Image: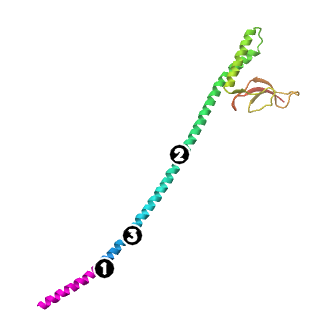
Amino acid sequence: MENEEIKEQTVVPEEAEEETAPAEEIAAEEAVEEAKEEKKEDRKRKKDKKNQKDSKDEEIALLNDKFLRLCAEYDNFKKRSQREKDGIYAESKGAIIKEFLPVYDNLERALKQQTEDEAYKKGVEMIMNQFRQSLEKLGVEQIPALGEKFNPELHNAVMHVEDEEKGENEIVEVFQQGFKLSDKVIRFAMVKVAN
């Protein structure tokens, strides 16, 4: 029996060695697989980092584009607001001046009337001069009419007369003086046109 026990003991280590060898191979294969997995994960992390960097670059580019568009839009808004403000001011100024033009017309009629009172005539002339100066300070100009060629953008023809001594479309009489503020006509000149 002793011999058998010894054989078993000797066999056991041989079997143990045989079992150990495949275990080492399995462990080595597992180590290789783990190394491969780590390399894959490492590549994946690098790829994710690159994708993340690319997506951040794209996001930065989008935000920069939005910022530039917002700046341009704000600049356009400021310019448009200023133009509207200037336009409203000019329109208001023109509307107010237009309300005072009948006073100008009445002063002009008063100057054409004959009077023996020189002080009265001088006073009306002074008021008219002051009124004209005030209009000039506000940038209001009279539209030239008498002797000029008729221009439908500046004049309003209410009468027509045939006169061989006058040129074609020449203004021969002004019924109501016209005015303009900068390039905008406040009131057209009411005129009589020849030929």
Farthest left residue in view: 1
Which of marks 1 and 3 precedes in the sequence? Answer: 1
Q: CA distance from mark 3 to mark 1?
A: 21 Å
Q: CA distance from mark 2 to mark 1?
A: 66 Å
Which residue is denoted by mark 3 in the rendering? 39
Q: Which region of the structure is painted magenta?
A: 1-23
| SS type, badge 2 | helix
Spot occupied by residue 181 in the image (x, y as percentages of width and height): 68, 29
Which residue is depicted at the point 48% across and 53% down? 60
The amino acid at mark 2 is Leu
The amino acid at mark 3 is Lys
| SS type, badge 1 | helix
Which residue is depicted at the point 55% across and 44% down? 73
The amino acid at mark 1 is Glu
The colour scheme used to paint the residues is rainbow
Is 92 situated above or below 113? below
Which residue is denoted by mark 1 in the rendering? 25
Q: Is residue 106 visible?
A: no
| SS type, badge 3 | helix
Dot 1 crowding, Cα within 10 Å, few <14, some 14–19, many 20+? few
Q: Is residue 136 magenta?
A: no
Spot occupied by residue 30 in the image (x, y as percentages of width and height): 32, 75
User: Mark on residue 70?
Assistant: 2
Is 121 situated above or below 57? above
